Image: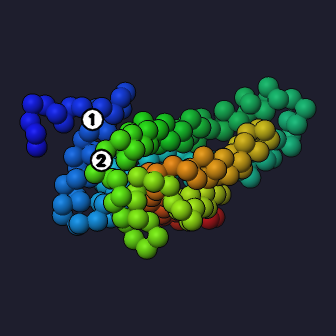
Amino acid sequence: AAGNGLSRAVDYGWFHAIARPMFDLCMWLYNMVGNMGVAIIILTIILRIVLFPLANKSYRAMSTMKKLQPRMEQLKERYADDKQRFAMEMMALYKEHKVNPMSGCWPTLVQIPILFAMYKMVLISFEFRHEPFMWWIHDLSAKDPYYVLPLLMGASMFVQMKLNPPASDPMQQQVMKLMPIIFTIVFLNFPSGLVLYWLISNVFAIAQQWIIMRRMGVNV
């Protein structure tokens, strides 16, 4: 309001091109609903809808991979002593069913810059300071005092992991099992507004993946 381009003093760093439009949309939503936490939830849903086509393709590929899991186990037993042959047969199986095993990574890779942009937006923007959400969340720019949101977020990641097909490598399987725990610990002291975003994003993704798996006849 002071003019002279003072608003440009708020710099979101490398993620400014993503964070600034997100901030403007969040403020518009806030003016509509009157609650910053609800505005973050609606913003998260809008972002998930925008990413829906990419996520939809990915979840279909992962559902097909989970459907092929019994055949993968047969191949693993048959070529237990020949890793190279197992890899070749596995890729042939993917090719037969037109599945790209890397397609499951794209939604996560796309969400990483959005996550960092959201972190910068909530941490730097003055508008989030001392802005309440509901009940025990009195400041969306500060951590959850009772760690409820981080624990719920970790639980949502655990459910998401269970929906995904297990990795073929035992070491990768162990790493994936630890991911929800690692993320929960990392997010414990993050701004509650950011944790709220990641939690709602995970819940939306779980619902989308569950519906796709049901339609494809995959056991959930």
Marks 2,1: beta carbons within 8 A: yes
Which one is in front, 59 or 14? 14
Image position, residue 28 (x, y; %): 19, 54
Q: Is residue 21 above or below residue 27?
A: above
Say which quadrant the N terminus sits in.
Answer: top left
Say which quadrant the C terminus sits in.
Answer: bottom right
Left or right placement of residue 80 versus residue 133 in this view: right
Write the residue at 66% across / 47% down. 182
* Residue 146 numbered tag: none
Task: Point out the tag, 2 or 1, that comes first from the N-terminus.
Answer: 1
| Residue that mark 2 sits on | 126
Q: Secondary structure at mark 2?
A: helix
Residue type beneath disc 2: Phe
Residue 33: image quadrant is: bottom left
Bin the neighbour count of mark 2 within 10 Å (Cα to Cα): few under 14, some 14-19, many 20 and up: few
Q: Secondary structure at mark 1?
A: loop
* Residue 10 numbered tag: 1
Image position, residue 73 (x, y; %): 79, 47
Residue 201: image quadrant is: bottom left
